[in-house]
Amino acid sequence: MKSDISTLTEEIVKFRDRRDWKQFHNAKDLALALSIEASELNELFLWKTHDEYDAQRLADELADVLTYALLLAHETKLDVRNIIRSKMEKNKKRYPVKKSKGLAKKYNEI
Ligand SMILES: [Mg+2]
């Protein structure tokens, strides 16, 4: 059975391929697009208080970020579930609950 992530990625790839945009989707440009979309998301918060944002615009920009993240994983043949689980295992070691609970510090500062 396919995961929701696989199904969603297939939908995005189908959307992309019907428009013949695969030719533009190398890892470098997808990484740049991801970063640019993350900046567009950040811009929604610029010069505002932390809870002052447009929810619909946030949803749209977050969708852009996630779409490029899924495309980048697809093009580089990375399994999204595996890389997230692998990174979480590393983070469990970097941030043991006993040392990091309630702290907003980087692992090398705890
Ligand atoms: Mg955008």
Image (cartoon, rainbow, N blue to C red):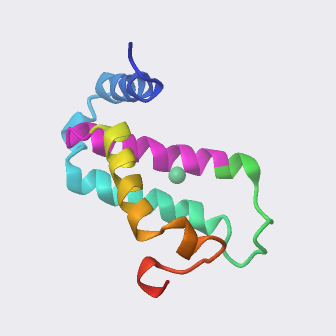
Query: Where is residue 50 shown, x and y percent of the image?
Result: 75, 71
Q: Residue furthest bottom?
A: 109
In-image side of 98 versus 22 (left or right): right
Identify the image quadrant of residue 82.
top left
> Residue 37, image x and y in percent?
47, 57
Q: Which residues are magenta?
A: 59-78
Pinpoint residue 71: horizontal percent, then vertical percent.
Answer: 33, 40
Q: Nearer the viewer, residue 5 or 63?
A: 5
- 16 to 98, vertically: above or below: above
- Number of disc labels: 0
For the point 58% across and 67% down, the residue is: 42
In the image, residue 60 lies in the stretch drawn in magenta: yes
Q: Nearer the viewer, residue 66 or 1?
A: 1
| Residue drawn where x is 44% and y is 41% of the image | 67
32 displayed left or right of 104 = left
Between residues 30 and 106, which one lies in front from this camera angle? 106
36, above or below 63, in the image: below
Q: Residue furthest top?
A: 1
